[in-house]
Image: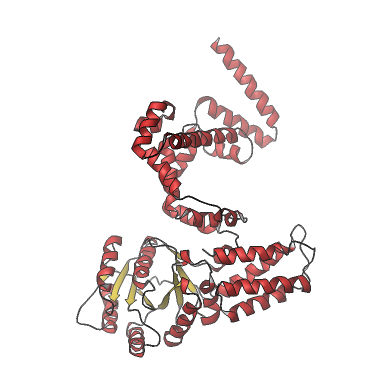
Amino acid sequence: MFESINQNLQKVFARFQRGGKLTDGNIQDGLREIRQALLDADVHFKVAKDLIDEVTNRAVGEKVIESVTPAQQIVKIFHDVLTAAMASDKPLVIGQHGPTVIMLAGLQGSGKTTTAGKLANLLKKRGRQPLLVAADLQRPAAVDQLKVLGQQLGIPVLAKTGVTPPELCAEAIPYARANGHDVVILDTAGRLHVDEPLMEEVAAVKARAKPHHVFFVCDAMTGQDAVNSARAFHERLALDGVILTKLDGDTRGGAAISIRHVTGAPVRFVGLGEKLDQLEEFHADRMASRVLGMGDVVSLVERAQSVVDEKQAEEAVTKLLTDEFTFEDFLFQLRSMKKLGPLKDVLAMLPGGLGAQLQNAPIDEKQLDRVEAVICSMTREERLRPDVLDVARRRRVARGSGNSLDQVNAVVKQFAGMRQMMKQLKSQSGLMGKMAARFMPGMSGAKQHKAQVIEEMRKKGDLLRAKRKLERDRKKQNRRRR
């Protein structure tokens, strides 16, 4: 996502590294290239001009803060300007009393029906009781598609024959109120903004249903066409927001950057994949960080919390710190990581520029599948006791998983290396010492004693005394054994 604009901007920012002050000369040269990078990313030309003018006004003459390079400062200024351009001045409000009506409109093929299901699923996870209304009576099988989505998600769908879309949407409000639904999502038919009869129909839907929010659903990969279509619908329906679909496949980012500035309708949600749980609320500051290659660790943590069981994750960390980590735990970690989405997208969310570097590295997503196949071909005893994996067992695992013996050996070696690395880190002070103390209840015997001593001495700032005390305790234990 946003690979091309990110790479172009990184090249420009690197040129600001020289010098201790942002001058008119070096800013004009750099911002001219930033403007070109924005235009190449299909950002609307007026938006690109306004952004560059605002950055210029803020940057010229500013002294570089101590310990901050000119490149870092220009990135900060550009981040603030970009965030302001995409941010909404009105938060999205879902009412507490009575059904909140959300109407979806847009072009054919933009993904409205799937987005309706995703939005209903997102609201259901937040404790709402949504109702889907199949008001797309133009496209064949659109009603059936919404019914299938509703069945998969466990969300009711209201569909009727012999009525017009405005009549059906108007009937949905009292139906939702009578059946305890607090959110109603209207899935209307796709239409071109130049199709006057259909535009009159969607205007009639709004007049009859009186929705609290009208969202325009559009394909992010259409670039400036998405902006132009949103503007046309906004003039007719007074949009409250935009939902960008297929943003995971958008390498340019033009629509996400331009749409709020041109139409006045902010982006509310973004679709990041085909699955029904891949819809996220849009945050301007986080999106600006992604565009500039600064990562998005907040969204990464939120995504992890939504797909990973916290108790299981804590148990896995405890085992990792106490040398009890098995292939069974490794398999859990692997599957949890796959739930986060494509590995390149996850890496892009890492902060500090690390994500941008790793995202461009050659990544074989199938390697994770091979590792999973190897572990799944092991017996339960082999997963829980990796030491029993002799050559004969490894050959059997290789045949069962469809891999070579060398590939199986590589997985076992990788697993052993991870355990060894954690053992070495655990013996050090600092962060790992604190983590060991945090998970101390899972330890036993000498390991727990060692962690307690290190933590107590760490608090006193005397690790040398901790080492001496541990050595004395070890000698005493050896004498008792003799």
Percent from the top left, x then y, of residue 354? 60, 53
Task: Place residue 420 in its image quadrant.
Answer: top right
User: 390 or 145: nearer the eye?
Assistant: 390
Percent from the top left, x then y, of residue 426? 58, 35
User: 437 or 357: nearer the eye?
Assistant: 357
Residue 357 relative to residue 189: left or right: right
Is residue 150 visible to the viewer in this orientation of the structure?
yes
Percent from the top left, x then y, of residue 368? 44, 46
Is residue 178 visible to the viewer in this orientation of the structure?
no
Task: Place residue 448 in its image quadrant.
Answer: top right
User: 28 or 77: nearer the eye?
Assistant: 28
Percent from the top left, x then y, of residue 387? 44, 27
Quarter holding the C terminus is: top right
Q: Residue furthest top?
A: 482
Relative vertical location of residue 430 with respect to residue 301 in this rendering, above or below: above
Relative vertical location of residue 224 with respect to residue 269 in this rendering, above or below: below
Look at 33% across and 75% down and name the residue there. Answer: 187
Relative vertical location of residue 399 with respect to residue 229 in this rendering, above or below: above
Residue 357 relative to residue 267: left or right: right
Task: Place residue 341 in its image quadrant.
Answer: bottom left
Residue 393 relative to residue 426: left or right: left
